[in-house]
Amino acid sequence: MQDTRARDVLRGGSVRALVLVAVLSLCMLPAVRRLGFRALSMASQAYNPGTHSAAFITCPNHTVALELARGIVQRKLAACVNIVPAIKSVYEWQGKIEEDDEVLLMVKTRSSMVSSLAEFVRSNHPYEVAEVISLPIEQGNPPYLKWIGDMVQEEPAASTSD
Ligand SMILES: *[C@@H]1O[C@H](CO)[C@@H](O)[C@H](O)[C@H]1NC(C)=O
């Protein structure tokens, strides 16, 4: 008799404990889920060095630079173009040393789009041989690097007719 009651009390106690544990886990589930998802999404967003590039393009003046920058961003060939004014370029061209006032474009884009970018510049730049060079971006502010990827076309367009 005594034993049975003790067992019942015990069983009642463990059921209550189970219910308590269940309720507690349910309450904590959203937090656990949030943390878990955040950890997961941060892992999948980890930047792979060289995924994006900084490209440099020299232009004869601000008008040409702004026109090119707009065309590049409108076509999603880059996330951002900085126009660096008043640079001086010294170079040899057809046997003569030139010293030109120029404007520099600093372009942030996906590395996979650099050849499309160069193609766009070749067909829209006044120079016979326009400078387009790029360097891989090794690292940076993760949200900014993610933003570059979000803004830029993922793949070069299949057609090059436009
Ligand atoms: C800018 O350069 C282009 C191409 O060389 C030229 O046609 C244009 O007249 C220049 N604009 C100004 C404001 O210097």
Image (cartoon, helix red, strand yellow):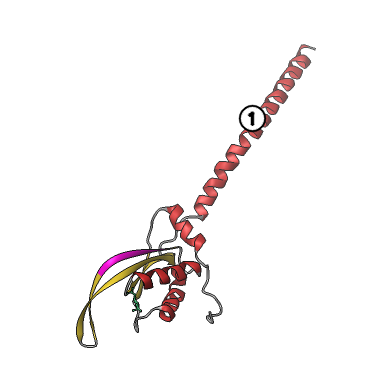
Q: Which residues are magenta?
A: 81-87
Q: Indicate yes or no whether the magenta region holds residue 83.
A: yes
Residue at mark 1: C-beta within 8 A of ligand 1: no
- The percent position of residue 38, horizontal first and vertical second, equals 54, 46
Compared across the picture, whether 98 is left or right of 25 comes to left
Above or below — where is 54 with respect to 22?
below
Which residue appears farthest toward the left when viewing the image?
Answer: 97
Identified at 47% across, 69% down, the residue is: 77
* Picture mark count: 1
- The percent position of residue 136, horizontal first and vertical second, equals 38, 66
Identified at 45% across, 66% down, the residue is: 78
Please identify the quarter of the rendering in which residue 128 is found. bottom left
- What element does badge 1 sit on? helix
- The percent position of residue 97, horizontal first and vertical second, equals 19, 81
In the rendered structure, which amino acid carries the disc numbered 1?
Leu
Using the image as rendered, state which of residue 162 and residue 113 is in the foreground: 162
Using the image as rendered, state which of residue 143 and residue 107 is in the foreground: 107
Q: Quadrant of ligand 1?
A: bottom left
Please identify the quarter of the rendering in which residue 5 is found. top right
Compared across the picture, whether 39 is left or right of 137 comes to right
Residue placed under numbered mark 1 in the picture: 24
Using the image as rendered, state which of residue 64 and residue 142 is in the foreground: 64
Q: Main secondary structure of the magenta part?
A: strand
Identified at 37% across, 61% down, the residue is: 138
Of the 4 image quadrants, the one containing the N terminus is top right
- The percent position of residue 100, horizontal first and vertical second, equals 24, 75
Q: Indicate yes or no whether the magenta region holds residue 52.
A: no
Which residue appears farthest toward the top when viewing the image?
Answer: 2
Above or below — where is 93 with respect to 105?
below
Around disc 1, counting alpha carbons within 10 Å, would you say few (fewer than 14), some (14 to 19), or many (20 or more)? few
Compared across the picture, whether 158 is left or right of 126 comes to right
